[in-house]
């Protein structure tokens, strides 16, 4: 179970749709099952969305001016994608 701010949860179109389907419930807490999402991946998605809410990523200029992520986006985002490729593409 991962507690998530509703505004952050609504960044996901899938979750947003599930929350809208559950709009008749007056409870402030809604549990949303995501059985096909691994816990490690969900944790990274929540971390990304939570950070993005407070510091949106700058738009990436095209064509890319550099292959070095830190020169294209803010440091936090460059560090965030510096993970094993298996997790990045999960």
Image: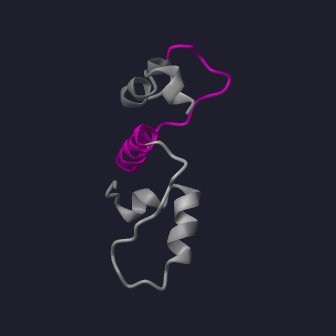
At horizontal 41% and vertical 62% (from top left) the residue drawn is 7
At horizontal 44% and vertical 59% (from top left) the residue drawn is 9
Q: Position of residue 30 (x, y in %)?
A: 39, 71
Q: Position of residue 90 (x, y in %)?
A: 55, 33
Q: Quadrant of the N terminus?
A: bottom left
* 61 in the magenta segment: yes
Q: Position of residue 53 (x, y in %)?
A: 39, 51
Image height check: is 85 above or below 22? above
Q: What's the image's color scheme?
A: one colour
* 37 in the magenta segment: no
Which residues lie in the magenta part?
39-68
Front-most of 13 and 77? 13
Side (left or right) of 48 relative to 37: left
Image height check: is 16 above or below 45? below
Residue that lies at the very extreme toward the top in this rendered image: 67
Q: How many marks?
A: 0
Q: Position of residue 15 (x, y in %)?
A: 52, 61
């Amino acid at each position: 179970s991962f507690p998530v701010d509703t505004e952050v949860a609504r960044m996901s179109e899938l979750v947003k749709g599930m929350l809208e389907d559950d709009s008749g419930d007056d409870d402030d807490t809604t549990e949303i099952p995501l059985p096909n999402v691994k816990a490690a991946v969900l944790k990274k998605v929540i971390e990304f969305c939570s950070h993005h809410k407070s510091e949106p990523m700058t738009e990436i200029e095209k064509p890319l001016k550099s292959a070095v992520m830190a020169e294209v986006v803010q440091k936090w985002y460059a560090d965030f994608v510096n993970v094993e490729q298996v997790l990045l593409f999960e």
